[in-house]
Amino acid sequence: MKFNNRNVSISDKAKIGKNVKIGDNTVIYDNVIIGDNSIISNDCIIGEPLNDYYFKDDYVNPETIIGENALIRSHTILYAGSRFGNNFSTGHRVTIRENSVFGNNCRLGTVTDIQGHVTFGNNCWLHSNVHIGQKSTIGNFVFIYPYVVFTNDPTPPSDVCIGATIGDFSQIAVGTVLLPGTVIGKHCLVGAQSLVGGNYEDYSLILGNPGRKIKDVREMKSRETGKSHYPWPYNFSRGLPWEKEGFDEWKKENGYEND
Amino acid sequence: MKFNNRNVSISDKAKIGKNVKIGDNTVIYDNVIIGDNSIISNDCIIGEPLNDYYFKDDYVNPETIIGENALIRSHTILYAGSRFGNNFSTGHRVTIRENSVFGNNCRLGTVTDIQGHVTFGNNCWLHSNVHIGQKSTIGNFVFIYPYVVFTNDPTPPSDVCIGATIGDFSQIAVGTVLLPGTVIGKHCLVGAQSLVGGNYEDYSLILGNPGRKIKDVREMKSRETGKSHYPWPYNFSRGLPWEKEGFDEWKKENGYEND
Amino acid sequence: MKFNNRNVSISDKAKIGKNVKIGDNTVIYDNVIIGDNSIISNDCIIGEPLNDYYFKDDYVNPETIIGENALIRSHTILYAGSRFGNNFSTGHRVTIRENSVFGNNCRLGTVTDIQGHVTFGNNCWLHSNVHIGQKSTIGNFVFIYPYVVFTNDPTPPSDVCIGATIGDFSQIAVGTVLLPGTVIGKHCLVGAQSLVGGNYEDYSLILGNPGRKIKDVREMKSRETGKSHYPWPYNFSRGLPWEKEGFDEWKKENGYEND
C-alpha cells in the first residue's frame, strides 16, 4: 500500500542498500547511506539539509548513515550529519537534528524531538514526545518516557550548553525535566513529573521537585511480590538481548559483570 | 482550495460514503469505511497499516470505520482497526493507533497522540497535545486539556499495562499526569499539573503532587458569582446536546437522572 | 534539493515577493502575501483556510501577510488571517492559527502550537513544543522554552477566555504552565516546571507550584562570577540588536531607557 514509488525523490548522491523499501512521498537527499533491508516509510525526509543550505551556494550535505534493518515511520525528519546503528526505528513525526549518534537497536516514539549534538548508546527506547536538548549523553538500555525534557542552559538565555548524562539501564519516567548538567548513574529510576538537577549515584530512586534520592531502587517493594522490580533487567526482557539466556548470563558474556 | 484530487490515493478496497470530500495528498488504505458527508482534509493517512504490514506477505488491513460528518484535519494519521462515531473531528497531526473506539461527537486537538487499545464514550473533547496510553477507558463528556498524559506501566519497564478510567463529565486540566490504574469518578475536576494516582469518588476536586481530593467540586466558590461553576454542565452548553433545553431537562430524557 | 517545483500548488490569488523560494509539496492558498527574499520550505501549508471554508460556499480566505526574509521550515501550517513581521522563522511542524500577530525577528521551534488571537512583539523566541492559548499578549524579547503552556479558561469548560500577559525581556523556562490571566512584568524569570498565576512585578524570579516571587532576579548570584546573569541582555546578545553596541547603548537609542 505504501511502496508505489509515487511522488518519491531520491538523490543520485544517495546510496541505498539491498532490499530497501522507500515509501510514497518520501525524499532522500544527498549523501544519505541506507543499510540493507531497511524500510523508510511514506512522507519521510532523510538527510534534511542543515541551515547553511538555505544561504550558501557551495553547501554540501554531510553524510547521513542509517544501519541495516531500520524502520522509519511516516513523516520522520532525519537531518544530515547523523549516524544511526542497526535496527533503528522511529514512530511518526520524529525529528532528529544533525550530529546525533545512535547505537544499535534504538527506538524513538511519535513526535520525539532530538535537538542534535547528542550521543545515545545501544538499545535506548524513547517513547512519544520526548525532547532531548543538545549535548546530552545517554548510555545503553536507557528508556525515556513521554514528555520528558532534557535541558542544557543553566541561565537562559546564555551561550552555555551543558547537557545531562545518563548511565546504563536508567529509566526516566513521564513528564520529568532534567536540568542542565544533571548526572544520573546506572540503574536509576526517576519518578514521574520530577524536576531533577545534580549528581545521583547508581541505583538511586529519584523523585519530586526538587528531585531527591529517596532510596536505593533495590529496596523498593512490590505489593504483589514483596520484592523489588529493580534492577529491572531481571524482570523485563521483551525485545532485549538477554531475552533467552537471562540477565545474569548475558552480563557475563557482554562485559557488564559489574552492573 | 484543498480538494483538487492532486496526489490523492484511495484503495479500491475502501468504501467512501456519499458527499465525502478527500483532500490533496491524502491516502486512504484498504478496508477503510467512511460515512456520508465526511471531510478528510489534505495530507491525511486513513487506515494506516499495522506493524505486521511491514513484515508479513499475507497482511490484511483490518477494518477502519469512520461515521458520518467527520472532519479530519490535515496530517492526521488514523491507524487501521479503529472505530469512530459520527461527527468525529481532529486537529492537525493527530495520531490514533489501532483498536481505539470513539463514540459520537468526539473532538481531538492538534498533535494529540492516542496509543490505541482505548475506549472513549460520546462527546469527549481532547485539546492539543494530549497523550493517552493503551488500556485507558474514558466515559462521556470528558474533556482533557493540553499536555495531559495517561500512563499505564506501574514499574517501567514491565509487561504490566493498567490504564486509567475516567467517569462521565470529568475534566482533566493542563499538564496533569495520570498514573497507571487511576480511577476517577464522575463530575470530577483535576487541577493543572497534578500527578494523580488512586481512586477518587464522584465530584472530587483533585489537585497537587501527589494529587489529593481537596474538596467537593460543588463547594467551590466563584469570586464573581459566589457559586460553584461545577457541575459544569449547568454552566456550559456550547456545542453540547443540552444547549437548548438545559442540563436538567436533558438528563431526564437521556438516562442521566443520577448525575 | 528542496526547490524543484515538485507537487507545489500556489493560488493565483497569492502575491509572492521577489526572490522567494517555495519548496516541494508546499501549498500556498488564496490571499497570501509573502515578502521578498523569503524561503518557504517543503511540505508547508500557508494560508490554511479557517473552519468556515469547509461549510460555506461563499468563503473568502482572509489575508495572510508574511514579511521579508522569512524562513519557514517544513511541515509548518500557517492559518490565513495572521500577520508575521520581517525575519520570521519557524522550525518543523509549527501550527499557527488565525488572528495571530507577530512583530519582527520572531522565531518558533519545532511542533510549537499557537492557538490564534494572540499578539507577540519583536524578537520573541519560542523553542520546541510551546503551546500558546488564545488571547495571550507577549511583549518584546520574550523567550519561551520547551513544553510551556499558556492557558486561558479559569473554570474549564467555560466561555471565559483570559490570556496571560508577559512583559518585555521576560523568560519562561521549560515545562511551566501559566494559569489564565497571569500578568508577568518585564525582565522576569519563571523557573522550570512552575505553575504560575497572578500578577508579578518587574524583575521577579518566580518559581514553584504554586509559583511565587522568590527574589529579585538582580539578586541572583552565579557560582562562577558571583554576579547575577540578569537582566540577561547585559550577558547575552547573539542574534539580538544590541550584539554590537551593547545593551546600554542600544537602550538609549531605542526607547528602552527605563528598562
Image: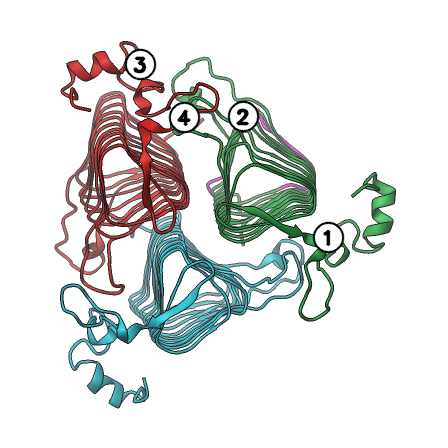
Chain colours: A red, B green, C cyan
Comes first in the chain, label 3 or label 4: 4
Q: Which residue is mark 3?
A: A243
Q: Main secondary structure of the magenta part?
A: loop
* B13 drawn magenta: yes
Please give the chain letter of the residue carrying mark 3: A
Residue drawn 52% across the image and 22% down it: B61
Q: CA distance from mark 4 to mark 1?
A: 40 Å
Residues tagged by mark 1 and mark 3 found on one chain of the structure: no
Magenta-drawn segment: B6-20
Q: Which residue is mark 1?
A: B231
Q: Which residue is mark 4?
A: A221
Whether label 2 touches label 4, CB < 8 Å: no
Is residue C62 toward the left or the right of residue B70 in the image?
A: left
Q: Nearer the viewer, mark 1 or mark 2?
A: 1
Q: Which residue is mark 2?
A: B30
Q: Residues within 10 Å of mark 4 (few under 14, many from 20)?
A: few
Q: CA distance from mark 1 to mark 3?
A: 51 Å
Task: Give the percent coordinates (x, y) of residue C43.
Answer: 39, 49
Secondary structure at numbered mark 1: loop
Q: Nearer the viewer, mark 1 or mark 3?
A: 1
- Image mark count: 4
Q: Nearer the viewer, mark 2 or mark 4?
A: 4
- Give amino acid for label 4: Lys
Please give the chain letter of the residue carrying mark 1: B
Q: CA distance from mark 2 to mark 4?
A: 48 Å
- Give amino acid for label 3: Glu
For residue A165, which quarter of the picture?
Answer: top left
Please give the chain letter of the residue carrying mark 2: B
Residue drawn 54% across the image and 54% down it: B1
Q: CA distance from mark 3 to mark 4?
A: 24 Å
Please give the chain letter of the residue carrying mark 4: A
Front one among A55 and A247: A247
